[in-house]
Image (cartoon, rainbow, N blue to C red):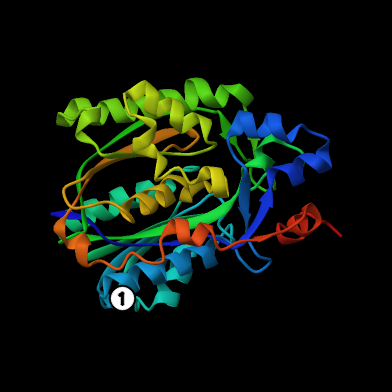
């Protein structure tokens, strides 16, 4: 069996409420909450970025796995907010967690699904016996132009997964669906992304998420009843609920991983944090459907079966416990933390 040997997560402690953002821009907070289903979002500290978040998540994952970090033969960091344009985040992580010097590394970019792409690469490398363990990370401090609709949800956080043999959760199957759909983009040297408005729902998010999920189930013989939990990428709280309904999943099956309401959209960390939250409570032989989404556009789907090894796995502090550790900031402090105030 090959799959998730360990996992770790990191969520900044700072939060800003939707009401505070709406107050500044003269918007109706109740209408925004109703439209997005997001009540507040995480905000990175002034010294936090995608690299520091990735390091913290990776440290927790390796510590929980109780493995020698030098046995990790590859590290991939997926993000759309890498701190350097030319200088890999993956090597920062490798150095910080003590991987030594004999490992393969690369930064990945595919909007919000770059972390799951790293999981697929690590899975393939372990399966081919190229490496013993691989480290796949999704980490972001997502950008949003002040006053843009994205600002109400664009958040910060990340998750890391050690992929290897004898896992706590076996990756039974994976499937991807991809097309050239320009629903969201950020050009070189531009600080904030642009988006196609409602075009981001259809044909972008819903087409790719449902096609990847259906493709996986059709190819490998699954149906919605075979899964105890489902986790979908969470740009807001409305889209994953609708996607679940389209695919035949009840709200109960996605509620454990629906962290977006409390921390916003953590981009590359979004579906992965939902998976971590689900693994926090999953029992042996329960099965999880994971479907990421990245604008541009593509989705990776996974069928994951929890194994007996999870009963001895240290799952505390859980994702939801970390979510409850929070300090609220006002809009001015939020701007300072996000470095949106230009001299």
Nearest the camera: 292 or 181?
A: 292
Task: Report the residue at 57% width, 54% height from top.
Answer: 156
Q: Quadrant of residue 325?
A: bottom right
Horizontal side of residue 182 vs 151, given as left or right = left
Horizontal side of residue 58 vs 308, given as left or right = right
Question: Eyeballing the image, is 236 above or below 311?
Answer: above
Residue under label 1: 69
Question: In this view of the protein, can residue 145 be seen by the observer?
Answer: no
Residue 221 image point, x, y percent? 15, 28
Residue 317 image point, x, y percent? 41, 66
Question: Eyeballing the image, is 312 above or below 184?
Answer: below
Nearest the camera: 60 or 229?
A: 229
Q: Secondary structure at mark 1?
A: helix
Question: In this view of the protein, can residue 27 be seen by the observer?
Answer: yes
Task: Report the residue at 34% width, 74% height from top.
Answer: 63
Residue 79 image point, x, y percent? 50, 52
Residue 238 image point, x, y percent? 52, 30
């Amino acid at each position: 069996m090959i799959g998730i040997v360990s996992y770790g997560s990191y969520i900044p402690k700072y939060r800003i409420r939707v009401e505070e953002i709406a107050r500044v821009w003269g918007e109706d907070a109740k209408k925004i909450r109703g439209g997005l289903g997001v009540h507040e979002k995480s905000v990175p500290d002034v010294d936090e970025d995608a690299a520091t978040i990735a390091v913290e998540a990776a440290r927790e994952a390796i510590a929980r796995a109780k493995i020698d970090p030098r046995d990790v033969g590859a590290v991939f960091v997926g993000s759309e907010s890498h701190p350097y344009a030319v200088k890999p985040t993956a090597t920062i992580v490798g150095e910080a967690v003590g991987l030594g010097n004999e490992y393969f590394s690369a930064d990945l970019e595919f909007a919000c699904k770059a972390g799951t792409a790293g999981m697929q690469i690590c899975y393939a490398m372990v399966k081919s016996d190229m490496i013993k363990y691989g480290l796949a990370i999704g980490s972001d401090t997502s950008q949003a132009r002040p006053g843009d609709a994205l600002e109400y949800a664009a958040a910060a956080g990340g998750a890391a997964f050690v992929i290897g043999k004898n896992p706590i959760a076996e990756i039974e199957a994976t499937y991807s669906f991809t097309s050239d759909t320009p629903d969201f983009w950020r050009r070189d040297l531009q600080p904030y992304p642009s988006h196609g408005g409602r075009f981001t729902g259809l044909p972008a998010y819903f087409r790719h998420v449902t096609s990847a999920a259906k493709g996986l189930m059709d190819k490998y013989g699954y149906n919605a009843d075979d899964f105890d939990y489902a986790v979908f990428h969470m740009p807001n709280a409305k889209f994953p609920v609708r996607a679940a309904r389209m695919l035949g999943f009840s709200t109960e099956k996605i509620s454990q991983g629906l962290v977006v309401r409390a921390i916003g959209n953590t981009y590359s960390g979004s579906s992965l944090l939902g998976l971590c939250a689900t693994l926090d409570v999953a029992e042996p032989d329960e099965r999880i459907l994971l479907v990421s989404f990245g604008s541009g556009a593509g989705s990776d789907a996974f069928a994951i079966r929890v194994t007996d090894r999870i009963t001895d796995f240290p799952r505390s502090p859980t994702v939801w416990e970390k979510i409850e550790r929070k300090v609220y900031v006002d809009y001015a402090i939020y701007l300072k933390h996000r470095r949106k105030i230009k001299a």
